[in-house]
Amino acid sequence: PRRLLVGAPWDGDRQGDIYKCRVGPPNATCAKANLGSAAPWLVPLPGHSVHLGMTLLDSKDGGFVACAPLWSQECGTSLFSTGICARLDGDLRPVGTIAPTAQRCSTYMDIVIVLDGSNSIYPWYEVQNFLSNVLSKFFIGPGQIQVGVLQYGERAVQEWALGRYRTAQEVVEAAKNISRQEGRETRTALAIHRAWCATRPEPCWDGWQDGEQGWRGDGD
């Protein structure tokens, strides 16, 4: 059946979307593509509109291109309205994006905090308060800063991995709920090495055995 694509840039509180409508039969209906659900990267920042569907173009592969001219990326305290376009197949399923002016934020980095949870640290609530205060100042989010926390005493334990929390509020709340590991030993070198391994994209052999206080295998 023949179909007509209709851009609705003011749909959904100006987030925008696309409708595909049947052409010809009486009482023909239109179905919403719900691109925001199918392609999360098109979802606007809270309080901002993107007007997806302002522009619709045919593509050579039988699909379409839908653009959101007011799509913005957040970098620290700055907001850049770069715009973004989504490539769609014939069934309006997202297959890629076109964002030539979007750039990696200068605040992009991975941070792993190594936290001493041995018996030598007291009182613990001061550690929690310090950690919450530091984390609240980071610009945490996809494409910006990702934070992981590793606590150590006699063992090194990952409290949470990089990218697990997507906002500063979520990270601060998680920091308030960290319980002290305790322990008579303070294995700082082990914890630092485990934190270094956590930032590497490939598997990392840490070269440690229980009870060791030195490096093994690589001679560092």
Image (tube, helix red, strand yellow):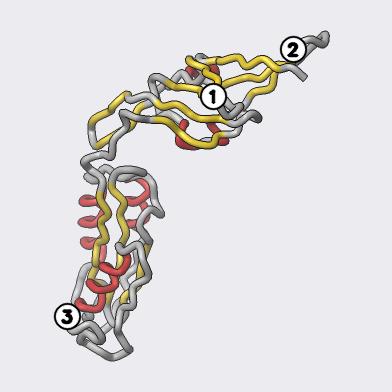
Q: Which of disc 3 and disc 1 is earlier in sequence?
A: 1
Tell me the residue that label 2 is attached to: 23
Residue 117 appears in the picture as rendered:
yes
Alpha carbon of mark 1 to alpha carbon of mark 3: how far?
55 Å
Residue beneath disc 3: 220
> Number of marks in the image?
3
Amino acid carrying label 3: it is Asp
Circle 2 SS class: loop
Please state which amino acid type lies under the numbered disc 2.
Val
Q: Position of residue 113 (x, y in %)?
A: 25, 62
The secondary structure type at the circle numbered 1 is loop
Residue annotated with mark 1:
59
Between label 1 and label 3, give the one nearer the viewer: 1
Res 195 quadrant in image: bottom left
Disc assigned to residue 74: none
Kind of residue sitting beneath label 1: Ser
Quarter of the view holding residue 162: bottom left
Side of 86 where 176 appears, left or right: left
